Image (cartoon, coloured by chain):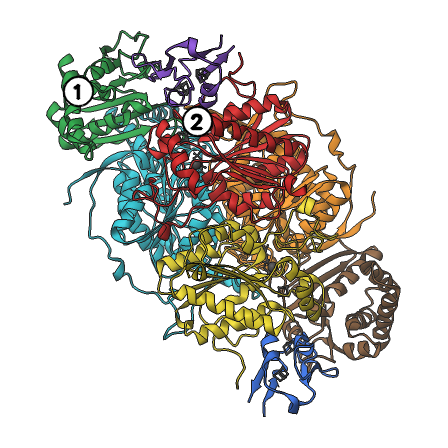
Chain colours: A yellow, B red, C brown, D green, E orange, F cyan, G blue, H purple
Amino acid sequence: MIFGRPAGLTDIKQRYCPGCGHGIVHRMIGELLAEMNIREKAVGIAPVGCSVFADEYFNCDMIQVPHGRAPAVATGIKRARPECFVFSYQGDGDLAAIGTAETVHSAARNENITIIFINNAIYGMTGGQLAPTTLPGMRSTTSVKGRDVVKQGYPIKVCELLNGLDGPYYIERVAVDTPKNIIKTKKAIKTAFQYQLDNKGFSLIEILSMCPTGWGVSPVQAKKWIAEVMAKYYPIGEFRNRAKEAK
Amino acid sequence: MIFGRPAGLTDIKQRYCPGCGHGIVHRMIGELLAEMNIREKAVGIAPVGCSVFADEYFNCDMIQVPHGRAPAVATGIKRARPECFVFSYQGDGDLAAIGTAETVHSAARNENITIIFINNAIYGMTGGQLAPTTLPGMRSTTSVKGRDVVKQGYPIKVCELLNGLDGPYYIERVAVDTPKNIIKTKKAIKTAFQYQLDNKGFSLIEILSMCPTGWGVSPVQAKKWIAEVMAKYYPIGEFRNRAKEAK
Amino acid sequence: MTTEIIIAGFGGQGVVSSGIILAYAGLLENLNVTFFPSYGAEMRGGTANCSVVVSDQKIASPVVTNPSVVIAMNEPSLLKFEPMVKQGGTLFFNQTLIKSRPKRTDIEIIPVEANKIAEELGQGRVANMVMLGAMIKKTGIIGIATMKKAQRKRFARANEEQLILNDKALERGFELI
Amino acid sequence: MTTEIIIAGFGGQGVVSSGIILAYAGLLENLNVTFFPSYGAEMRGGTANCSVVVSDQKIASPVVTNPSVVIAMNEPSLLKFEPMVKQGGTLFFNQTLIKSRPKRTDIEIIPVEANKIAEELGQGRVANMVMLGAMIKKTGIIGIATMKKAQRKRFARANEEQLILNDKALERGFELI
Amino acid sequence: MAEKQLMYGNHALVEGVIHAGCRFFAGYPITPQNEVPEYMSIRMNEVGGVFLQTESELAAINMLFGAASTGARAMTSSSSPGISLMQEGLSYITGADVPVLVANIVRGGPGLGNIAPAQSDYFQSVKSGGHGDYHTIVLAPNSAQELFEFPRLGFELAEKYRNPALILADGLLGQIMEPVELKGEPVDPKNLPEKDWHLTGCKGRERRVIRSYDLRPGKLEEWNWRRWEKYQKIIKNEQRYEAINCEDAEIIIVAYGTSARVSEAGLRIARENKIRVGLLRPITLWPFPNDIISDLSKRVENFLVVEMSLGQMIDDVRLAIEGRSKVDFIGHPGGGLPNAQEVFDKILEIRGRK
Amino acid sequence: MAEKQLMYGNHALVEGVIHAGCRFFAGYPITPQNEVPEYMSIRMNEVGGVFLQTESELAAINMLFGAASTGARAMTSSSSPGISLMQEGLSYITGADVPVLVANIVRGGPGLGNIAPAQSDYFQSVKSGGHGDYHTIVLAPNSAQELFEFPRLGFELAEKYRNPALILADGLLGQIMEPVELKGEPVDPKNLPEKDWHLTGCKGRERRVIRSYDLRPGKLEEWNWRRWEKYQKIIKNEQRYEAINCEDAEIIIVAYGTSARVSEAGLRIARENKIRVGLLRPITLWPFPNDIISDLSKRVENFLVVEMSLGQMIDDVRLAIEGRSKVDFIGHPGGGLPNAQEVFDKILEIRGRK
Amino acid sequence: MPEIKILEEVCKGCGLCCDDICPVKILRLAPDRINSSGYHPAEVTDMSKCIGCGYCYMTCPEPAIEVYK
Amino acid sequence: MPEIKILEEVCKGCGLCCDDICPVKILRLAPDRINSSGYHPAEVTDMSKCIGCGYCYMTCPEPAIEVYK
Ligand SMILES: Cc1ncc(C[n+]2csc(CCOP(=O)(O)OP(=O)(O)O)c2C)c(N)n1
Ligand SMILES: Cc1ncc(C[n+]2csc(CCOP(=O)(O)OP(=O)(O)O)c2C)c(N)n1
Ligand code: SF4
Ligand code: SF4
Ligand code: SF4
Ligand code: SF4
Ligand code: SF4
Ligand code: SF4
Ligand SMILES: [Mg+2]
Ligand SMILES: [Mg+2]
């Protein structure tokens, strides 16, 4: 077998909807935990969101934490046990709404942790409400006529925002809509993981990810929408890499 | 009398320490409330911080609110009574630490409010602890050997951070160390106030301000330190002005 | 008379709609009704089920613990709810998707080829309507005319073909019994 | 014997230090002591005051409501605390800064030119020491030698001139009585 | 009489809020009350009100603080974890004597718990989960109909006493559909009177200040005692409850919300079996209907408290009874539901002991 | 015996935390406990521990959640408003059965209130201010010495029962200076045993998961009942109190913290006047020393509760007494302090009524 | 000869692998079958064409696909 | 003739106005006097030099200075 369920994932069948991007990202993290030989020292953090169940899916020590506070919990774990490899897995509501302060401050502290940020532009878990990342004009169950930027404000571009800080070491935005992008995504996550192992500090990988259910479209339409619309609003690319600045 | 206590301030003697920058900013706001004829429709928001007492000092309707939540309260007031002129007055701990989420999101919403942000790089009220804006190497009562960026992280540059958002209309950083800068500061505050009256949306004026007590120096040393050190780390200037972009 | 009903199945099987349609129908016949859905995880996955109470008296508890009627749309639902059916009650199950067979002998058991019939009608999704048709015929708690009105209330925004298809499915189920 | 003392004045007048020095001194003389400062606003402005209890028994309450000794360093403090002094107690007040005069006749009143003397010594800040010197002489609760040790404990990081100046101020106050 | 409509409890709550003349909602999604912000976003848009989906529950409660300070009827809605995040804000708002309305559609806890119906936030609601001495008025509906009616009552009590009001409903009440009658004349927000504390700009009057602090020695204590007097008034005037078959009862069940409905079903079985059981359903949890229970305890030997929790309201029942009667308990924490049979069995057990 | 040092209560607390082998502190400044983070930042630096000044109290409590999950002794400290912000986190931590230590140096409330000493966070602490059914172990020191000693007790109880522990001390106790004896052998963090739930990386063992949710039908209820059994154990084994002159007392004062010290002064006056007064000082507020008070109420006619609040602990006293004895009350909310004379006067009044 | 195995019971019939990602277009959703979760699982039309690139595996959220060489 | 008035009881003796901000350098802290708050108030050395620029007023946090023309 050259490709198959990685050792970094448990055998539990995932509860995500058909075509959900979470599963694709889970698979890659699961592979890296094994490939990079960090599964046995990893402590992963599951948020509140559809990926609350990540604590069942990643085959390593896990903790499920209050909505938005994953970076604070990660900080506590990493400071108490620097020898552990600590990553948090968070959605846009979790990371960019209720968790804004913890996200910004863990980045400002250049905390030596890795944040995997699933941007699906919606609150999946609770039924498709407006997220801080919902695009202008995009429909949600709390913006049935589409996001009105005058009343509901502009979306938050997390990478651009955090790039305004001196602290963070590595920030990149990727997507999981095509095999090519999926491969890039894995590379970015791997780089981030390596930086933590090298004690470089804070990394955040923002991943544009399908939520067919929340978007009310088929999985295939969902992945196409990422390329055609979402990635235009949230440009893919590397925003911060202090390793390169250093050079 | 060509210069004297403005009608926008009450007669109550202010409790601030000798040489405190808060008083200088209060005076200018007090003047503008009168000059711009908005005192009678203004609702001001006092934070938790040394300026908690601002609710006694500004001669208009005032509300004192939980630590860091002023932008949320301001949003509530402005949305419920758009005809009112709404400004919040906040310190760095209040706005950039505990209030980070409310600050970022009111900016992202381009909420039609004005935030006067007093950056004195310290927690004045509680006795000079480390602030999110305390400079690297700067001493505080919780960083007695000076801020160690490795352990305590990097300061947050609020204007630079918020500039990573699409939402905000006007963002400028000023200082109150010299008459020249004080005059500039008043101009910036006036511009921000005017934008709210014109329904342009969110303005934030960051003001580098002396805290002789928290810094453990004389008022005169304090004001010199702003020019010599603080303003170098927090460059003064206009970061965002959508009125100009428009042109 | 008070009838306590549980309808259970996958998320996609229209379990919740079935319950709401029943409740609407009860209301249309001036009965007291309550409808209570319950999901697995916050929103995602797992099987959904709902409790419906239809009664000519004021309804005290909307919580159904031993239903007189159960509609099981898939395997897990059958396993979960068969034991709960009140003695002498009726269990309807979706024969197309459910491999195993009910074991109880103290209740009446009605197999329905819900998905098969639905597919025949050209849309698997209406399997729940087939089930409802069979159920009301068997129990007599609601007339089919009322059910047709009720499904139109539920799917107010649906197009006419769909509504007609739903009616057909109700009738097919109704005729089964 | 239990002595309950309140010291009050502006933030800058070393009120808190005075209290702590007294407490240190009490401890040095193997007495039980408690010290409790109270400020106005969270940290800023207003007048500060502190309660010190010195006793040869276990101290139950550190809260002082009718002090047997009050030291008033400024006007507001005099106004606030004069009425609280226990009958037969002693009130020391800073004559240099306080314009008005105490009115009570049922207590002993000791005016002290604290700031004047301190300025003579070349540093207004040591006015509190002058006051302490006078107070311990009058009440005899603590010896001056102990007070000198105590202020050195309090100002462990201060330079020697300052410490000597403090001693001088204590003595000047001591000699006043 | 308006005809009845089949409605989700959560939708009935929204209709009740609009009906009460509220035009300001700020909230954050959370199961089992997502239908509230979702439906509210549509209705507020229709009636020209303000709907804000906030960055968090902290922001929501503080937006209410601002909006209500201007005199607007303002409400938020959430469920257990979200309500926990509002405790500081509620303490401030109560300390500033500002009326707001908060709905808690309770789920299983502690922590993330689950999304099943629960009553385990009773202590948080009635004993004040925030810091300092304060109480919030707490209303406990037990049907979609009451979810429609109580927002208005909540606003009226909140404004009458300048104190926040809570609607505490277990998740089942939010999730069920029942026929609801949209009774009464809707309140026109324009007709809500301006009070002498509203922040509206000081044109033509003294400036006004809303705050929750007073650093002057002794002043905050006085203020708290004034609030205490207000609370005594509320306790005296506002105890609300529903008494079912209590007159001749030998055993009285005390339960609210869904527990009360299940208990009533249990009571019916008991009555069919000729057992004289009564049900005392608190409608205000604070003020708690202490007086009626205290009176009843002078002649009724046995009380049975039924809660969807490990037992919280039972403390208030025991405080009212002061040892005069025996108190039994049925509890279901963590989203568990009681059922009529179990209530009846418990009644038989109590009876057996006599 | 180590010689006594004059210390701030807040500094004694810090020394006690270090002494208990805690090497992880995360907190946010707030009066009247600023000396805790300030001094802690110096001491943790000296002992090579972790000191984190956080962006907020929410972050602090969640950092504790993380640190304690790895087996570290972790603590935070704050005052009333800051503690209100920790309620969601505390509910999660309790729901995940993780031991942490939280100190609340209480100030006047509600809202911003003031910075004077208070006891008005009693309900929040003992009735659980967060959502869901849970309790935190609550220790109430009444001297700088106990502020030094209780962190260790707190950690030991917290770890024994896998439950958070609180230290509840009014601001006066944090602000006073008193002689403190740094008793006992300090705990070496290296000697703290690893437990089978610590998150340390799954090398050579099954992976471990810490969570507070369970969505499987009925499971969360079972979990809550297991926690209930744990709580019954704690209630049975851990009720702590100090009884002064209770043997022959005709009137018993119940008070904790500073109120207890003032009451003791009042008691002394009474005894000088040949009035047989006793003082029952709860040391654990949860579990509340219910049994001793219940016993005493069988022979003592009058109880006097003294609190720096509008009356919160009095509920637990009345629940223990169940109407057997009369309960009087002296309260000072909003940062007010009682004094010995007033306690004595009340005693005379009670006596007069007899 | 590379080939893939589809775990039909794990597959959720999302169709991501059946769209355009397979370079040799040999994947589709089985029109006739549903698995016990009620999904039409993916199936291979002509295994001999498979080049073992793994794109289907990478695209599958579950993952319900294994690739062998 | 411009002149300024210093409200001695309001002044906190911070010295900001006495530093280098007065173009004609006529401000200093009174060496001999303290106000009832214990501060040495600012005083004018030579009023005739005042040009009424208002810098002192602008610099004063209280403000304890009034400027007249
Ligand atoms: C304090 C609190 N507020 C709200 C919720 C409800 N809630 C659960 S998940 C969620 C949002 C999930 O959206 P996101 O973070 O984008 O994750 P996704 O489901 O989209 O992957 C919310 C609001 C909660 N559990 N706790
Ligand atoms: C929830 C909460 N946390 C902490 C505090 C304590 N506190 C009061 S003011 C303050 C910080 C003030 O610093 P800043 O905002 O910079 O204002 P400054 O005093 O420097 O003007 C803090 C932490 C509080 N009152 N409430
Ligand atoms: S709701 Fe969206 S994010 Fe959540 S599991 Fe379904 S597809 Fe994935
Ligand atoms: S502490 Fe600093 S900020 Fe606060 S009043 Fe004093 S000088 Fe001003
Ligand atoms: S491995 Fe490549 S070629 Fe083979 S089926 Fe999968 S995508 Fe097609
Ligand atoms: S991608 Fe996976 S789940 Fe989706 S259809 Fe293909 S095999 Fe099935
Ligand atoms: S007005 Fe100008 S010139 Fe006159 S005193 Fe002030 S600063 Fe000096
Ligand atoms: S600036 Fe104002 S307060 Fe400072 S010394 Fe001058 S007059 Fe006095
Ligand atoms: Mg999302
Ligand atoms: Mg500051």
Residue E211 place in picture, x, y as percent: 53, 29
Q: Is residue E45 left or right of residue B17?
A: right
**Which quadrant holds residue E218?**
top left
Element type at mark 2: loop
Q: Is residue E200 left or right of residue G31?
A: left
Residue occupied by mark 2: E215
Q: Amino acid at mark 1?
A: Ala
The residue at the point 40 percent across, 14 percent down is H9
Q: Nearer the viewer, residue H28 or F70?
A: H28
Residue C5 seen from this side: no
Tell which tag, 1 or 2, sits nearer the viewer: 1
Per the rendering, the mark at residue F79 is: none
Residue occupied by mark 1: D169
Q: Nearer the viewer, residue F102 or B141?
A: B141
Residue E78 place in picture, x, y as percent: 60, 49
Q: Amino acid at mark 2?
A: Leu
The residue at the point 26 percent across, 14 percent down is D94
Q: Quadrant of the C terminus of chain F?
A: top left
Residue E235 seen from this side: yes
* Neighbour tally class for label 2: few under 14, some 14-19, many 20 plus, Cα within 10 Å: some
Callouts 1 and 2 on one subunit: no
- Badge count: 2
